[in-house]
Amino acid sequence: MPFGARSRVPLALGVGVWYPCSRVSFPIHRASYRTLDPDWEGEVFVADIDRTYLATHFSSMKGLAKIPFERAADKEDIAGMARLFREIRRGPGAERRDTPLYFVSASPAQLRPVIERKMMLDGIGFDGTTFKNWSSVVRRLRFSRLREQIGFKLTALLAGRAELPPGAIENLVGDDLETDPLTYALYADVLAGRIPSSDVSRILQINGVYEGDARAIARMRRELTPGRGVKRAYIRMERHADPEVFKDFGPGIVGCRGAFQMAAALMHEGSISAEGVVRVAEDLLQRGLPAQELRERLLDLCRRALLTPDETMALSEELARADLLPPLEDAGLADPEWEAVWQRGPERLWTPARYVGEG
């Protein structure tokens, strides 16, 4: 097993070790299928499911009511994302590395078999899933929790972090439909100590987290063994057309126009291969993305300094060799303002000041 990992049970059986997580305040339900050795070091990916990988509809009560009754065949994956997760799992080298990959969903825990079946149908290997425990929410008559995301996701992320070895460094994947950018920024800052434990509860409450949940999250953080924390978070842009809104979240939170930009940014970080980026691009084109739009997204990566001009031209040549795009004549130059975003120091809060009561 790569990376010294110990598998508790074969994933294909669809069974694992289940964690009702009764010790936490927000009701969640976890299943883990893989245990990493305590001395393991390396990248771990934790990804959202709803509106990141699957087109789940939370925007109305009608959409919420339909979720528990959907089948795997009803689940629509978002173009390019299944391919991206397969490339993340594969890793950057010639040999498959089985990068640890975990998923979090605000869907009810009863949908775990359906969603895990969908991921298997899409060829996505994964090591665990965390769902919102809707049954517990309903029993406690706290119906607003069905749509509350920050408290839920922070609880899920911290519960997952508690099971990782200290040498694990997390990459997070989400979307901008609801609260992922803010939640991921808060999580990274809390782990790194940029937000001290003594201030966690206050900041969470001003962002809509229930007082009891906020205190429980602060307690979970105090009980964690120090580790390497979060490397970066990648956000699939759907609500925002302009990536400028992510400047305040930089350098930790990266807004991406779909799976191709995520793949290219991860290639730059050494997480997936150039060939993997090409495969993601091919998937998107087959799903109907216009070639001109793909070209514009490639140039935008250079403009926002997510790729260097040399990397942009090299990726253009790879795409041309695969007959996906004509080669670029000139990648252009990076915008100095975006270059400055990625040069900000590690002491800077990822969470914009307005969310910590300073704006």
Image (tube, rainbow, N blue to C red):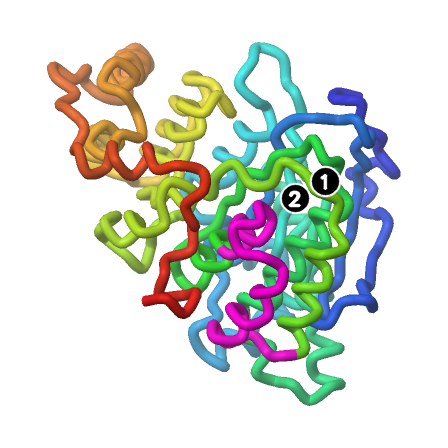
- From mark 1 to mark 2, how far is it between C-alphas? 5 Å
Disc sitting over residue 30 in the figure = none
Q: Residues within 10 Å of mark 2 (few under 14, many from 20)?
A: many
Q: Are marks 1 and 2 in contact (CB under 8 Å)?
A: yes
Q: Earlier in the sequence, mark 1 or mark 2?
A: 2
Disc 1 designates what residue?
127
Label 2 secondary element: strand
Residue 201 in magenta?
A: yes
In this image, 33 relative to 355: left or right?
A: right
Type of amino acid under label 2: Tyr
Please tell me how crowded label 1 is: few (under 14), some (14-19), or many (20+) other residues with Cα within 10 Å: some
- Residue 237, position in %: x, y? 34, 51
- The magenta stretch spans which residues? 186-211
Q: Residue at x 48, y 39 (%)?
A: 232
Q: Which residue is mark 2?
A: 102
Looking at the image, which residue is at 66% across and 64% down? 218
